[in-house]
Image (tube, rainbow, N blue to C red):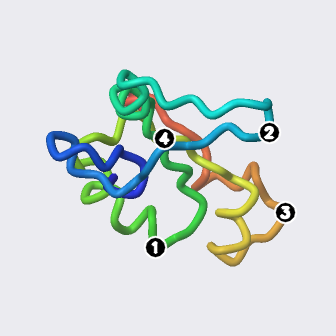
Amino acid sequence: MRAVRSERPDAGGVHGYGMRRSVGYVRTAPSLGETMDDIVIAIMVEKTGAMDNLEKILSVPGVDMVQFGPSDYSISYGKPGQNNYRKFKMRNSDD
């Protein structure tokens, strides 16, 4: 979280201004720090280690979203290319 939050004292992050030199000017508006902190933090779960620690990942303050990546997970799980493997499918709570 610290890597993506601004380095403002109240934000607790380490990210400095994202200078936008590629568009011909540098944006240094005071509100940029707040804008940097008003982002969605999404984590892509693609490894068995992430699945094994999913509850810990979900409990990290600031995580807004988690997405499952079946293709890479299938490799990590030892079933490469088997994205439709039954263990990878989402199940309803009624199943």
Q: CA distance from mark 2 to mark 3?
A: 39 Å
Task: Give the crowd class for mark 2: few <14, some 14-19, many >=20 residues within 10 Å.
Answer: few
Sequence order check, earlier mark of 1 and 4: 4
Sequence order check, earlier mark of 2 and 4: 2
In the structure shown, which secondary structural element does the residue marked by tag 4 occupy?
Answer: strand
Write the residue at 53% across / 55% down.
45
Q: Quadrant of the C terminus?
A: top left
Q: CA distance from mark 3 to mark 1?
A: 19 Å
Disc 2 marks which residue? 22
Judge from the rendering whether residue 68 lies leftward or rightward of residue 21; answer left or right.
left
Disc 4 marks which residue? 42
Q: Nearer the viewer, mark 3 or mark 1?
A: 1
Write the residue at 63% across / 34% down.
26
Judge from the rendering whether residue 45 lies leftward or rightward of residue 37; answer left or right.
right
Instruction: Please name the amino acid that badge 3 sits on.
Output: Gly
Q: Residue 22's x, y, as percent?
A: 79, 39
In the structure shown, which secondary structural element does the residue marked by tag 2 occupy?
Answer: helix
- Give the image quarter of residue 94: top left
Sequence order check, earlier mark of 1 and 2: 2
Q: CA distance from mark 2 to mark 4?
A: 26 Å
Q: Is 57 situated above or below 39?
A: below
Disc 3 marks which residue? 81
In the structure shown, which secondary structural element does the residue marked by tag 3 occupy?
Answer: loop
Residue 49 is tagged as 1
Q: Residue 20's x, y, as percent?
A: 67, 37
Write the residue at 21% across / 50% down.
12
Q: CA distance from mark 4 to mark 3?
A: 24 Å
In the structure shown, which secondary structural element does the residue marked by tag 1 occupy?
Answer: helix
